[in-house]
Image (spheres, helix red, strand yellow):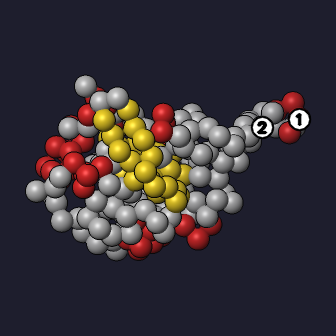
């Protein structure tokens, strides 16, 4: 049985707007805004998972307005395609991954992993980064996700990542028990 510390320990999704540049059509000469340069998540960016779209077991959002693009990729994963900056993915309330800008960590396709503590009062970030974030099963997030590099580092069945030691029903129960949803 997992204790609350285990459940809140760290690593699957993402977001907020610290260093963001959306471009300006008047100065760039195009009618579409430029892609954001980066997205640095804050604790306020992580909220009740039940408010986010669900694709298979993954909960997904994009705080920069690119949710449809992120959902399309989640629904029909393509080798070599990458999620838009600002995408946040979570499997468990206490773990997340956030898509950062193109210069954040190219060897990790610019994902930042998070260990979170979640309570009815909100979210706090315990650890963020790549190599220092350990998931609730004791493994390094990046060490597992690197096996799914062809799929933008998103682990799911059949993508080379180690299978989780729990089933879909337990994942659903953990998401439903997110204390931020009450």
Instruction: Tell me if mark 2 has few (under 14), some (14-19) or many (20+) residues whose alpha carbon lies within 10 angstroms of its own.
Output: some
Identify which residue, 59 or 46, lies in the foreground.
46
Q: Is residue 33 visible?
A: yes
Element under label 1?
Answer: helix
Mark drawn on residue 27: 1
Residue 175 location, quadrant: top left
Q: Position of residue 111 (x, y in %)?
A: 53, 58
The answer for how far apart the CA atoms under marks 2 and 1 are is 8 Å
The quadrant in which the N terminus is found is bottom left
Residue 53 location, quadrant: top left
Q: Position of residue 34 (x, y in %)?
A: 74, 42
The quadrant in which the C terminus is found is top left
Residue 93 location, quadrant: top left
Mark drawn on residue 161: none
Q: Which residue of the protein is positioned furthest toward the top in this rendering? A: 182
Residue displayed at 35% across by 29% down: 121
Q: Is residue 148 visible?
A: no
Residue displayed at 36% across by 51% down: 95
C-beta proximity under 8 Å, tags 2 and 1:
yes
Residue displayed at 33% across by 48% down: 94
Element under label 2?
Answer: loop
Identify which residue, 75 or 147, lies in the foreground.
147
Q: Position of residue 12 (x, y in %)?
A: 39, 54
Against 47, residue 11 (above or below) is below
Q: Please state if 158 lies on the left or on the right of 72 as rendered.
A: left
Q: Which residue is mark 2?
A: 23
Against 79, residue 160 (above or below) is below
Against 172, residue 132 (above or below) is below
């Amino acid at each position: 049985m997992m204790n609350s510390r285990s459940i809140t320990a760290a690593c699957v999704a993402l977001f907020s707007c610290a260093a963001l540049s959306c471009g300006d059509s008047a100065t760039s000469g195009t009618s579409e805004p430029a892609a954001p340069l980066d997205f640095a998540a804050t604790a306020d960016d992580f909220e009740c998972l039940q408010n986010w779209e669900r694709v298979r077991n993954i909960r997904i959002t994009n705080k920069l307005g690119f949710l449809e693009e992120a959902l399309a990729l989640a629904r029909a994963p393509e080798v070599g395609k990458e999620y838009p900056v600002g995408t946040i993915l979570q499997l468990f309330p206490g773990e997340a991954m956030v898509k950062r800008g193109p210069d954040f960590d190219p060897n990790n396709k610019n994902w930042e992993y998070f260990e979170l503590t979640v309570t009815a009062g909100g979210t706090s970030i315990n650890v963020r980064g790549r190599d220092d974030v350990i998931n609730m099963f004791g493994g390094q997030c990046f060490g597992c996700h690197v096996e799914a590099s062809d799929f933008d580092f998103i682990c799911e069945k059949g993508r080379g990542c180690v299978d989780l030691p729990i089933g879909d029903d337990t994942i659903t129960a953990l998401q439903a028990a997110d204390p931020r949803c009450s």
